[in-house]
Amino acid sequence: MKTYTDTGKKDTRSGFGAGLTALGQTNPDVVALCADLTGSLKMDEFKANHPERFFQVGIAEANMMGLAAGMTIGGKIPFTGTFANFSTGRVYDQIRQSIAYSHKNVKICASHAGLTLGEDGATHQILEDIGLMKMLPGMTVINTCDFNQTKAATMAIAQHHGPVYLRFGRPKVPNFTPEDQNFEIGKAVQLQEGSDVTIVATGHLVWEALEAAKALNEESISAEVINIHTIKPLDTDAIVKSVKKTGCIVTAEEHNFLGGLGESVARELALHHPTPQEFVATNDTFGESGTPAQLMDKYGLNAAAIAAKAKKVMGRK
């Protein structure tokens, strides 16, 4: 069984900041816009290095999306930055009309997503954003798992023409993917080979999936773990290939089970290879205030929950 090492906990939003800083040095067309959260989005270094390419719009997220859309007409590559709730729910009309419908080359970069926002509570813990964004025609949706992958994804989306939603978070989490990785949009990454059950996970749940696989291995259950960093376009081939071998699947995400990764996987399996599936996700509910660890445990978004669902779905084969 392959093992992965946590090289030191880092927040994924800092991976975004590092990627944006690198882009500032290599791509003069990259511009950054922020809605009064420069420090929270780790955009300070880009601002310091390129003040002429940084635009602080204040608490005016809708205006920020309109500005970003307009900048693309002149050949700029705008990266917008604010919390996930304000990057999607607050500005859905502007994204739909000015960015997605017009297929503008805007990169919507969203931090503080999901329950791991923690103490700020349900009003800020958006668990619907992946669904909102993936339903927009032409929108690419990416949800990264650690610092290194977020940095690589940030740099990769600058090379992709078209609107992108990049989702990441606030807490420090294990950093375990390669520093020099080649991030390929729409291409799943097999982390662990297995024969009894497939576990596909995204974002903060990828590390938990690896921990679940380790626990299952101690019970002589061989779990295949796949990192789905791109939810749209989904790597259907990788998923179908895996379930043809294992015969069952668990999907794991820090998002409502309605509209998230699990539903996308279920659709593809229904079309191409019907397979027993269990979901690790929030169950049509809002969050609440608490530490990230408390909330992930309470809402069943952890390694223990993934392992339990793996055993349950194996019984349905």
Image (tube, rainbow, N blue to C red):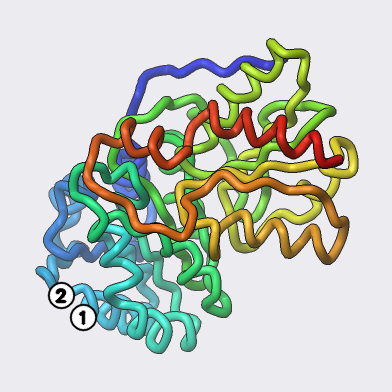
**Residue 64 in view here:** yes
| SS at circle 2 | loop
The Cα–Cα distance between marks 1 and 2, rounded to whole angstroms, is: 5 Å
Number of residues whose C-alpha sits closer than 10 Å to that of mark 1, classed few (under 14), some (14–19) or many (20 or more)? some
Q: Residue at x 36, y 78 (%)?
A: 92
Q: Position of residue 102 (x, y in %)?
A: 47, 87
Residue 189 at x, y percent in the picture: 66, 39
For disc 2, the neighbor class at 10 Å (few under 14, some 14 to 19, many from 20) is some
Residue 211 position in % (x across, y down): 56, 22
Residue placed most toward the observer, 300 or 137: 300
Give whichever of 77, 95 is nearer the camera.
95
Left or right, 142 with reference to 19: right
Q: Residue at x 83, y 43 (%)?
A: 243
Seen as rendered, the residue at the extreme top is 218
Residue 61 position (above or below residue 97): above
Label 2 sits on what residue type?
Ala
**Total residue callouts:** 2
Q: Which residue is mark 1?
A: 63
Q: From the top left corner, tell me how far across and down residue 268 is, in percent.
A: 76, 62
- In the picture, the quarter occupied by the N terminus is top right
Seen from the viewer's position, the closer of residues 151 and 145 is 145
Contact (Cβ within 8 Å) of mark 1 with mark 2: yes
**Residue 264 marker:** none
Quadrant position of the C terminus in the picture: top right
Mark 2 — residue? 60
Residue type indicated by callout 1: Asn
Secondary structure under badge 1? Answer: helix
- Residue 56 picture quarter: bottom left
Above/below status of 119 relative to 37 = above
- Quadrant of residue 147 within the rendered picture: top left
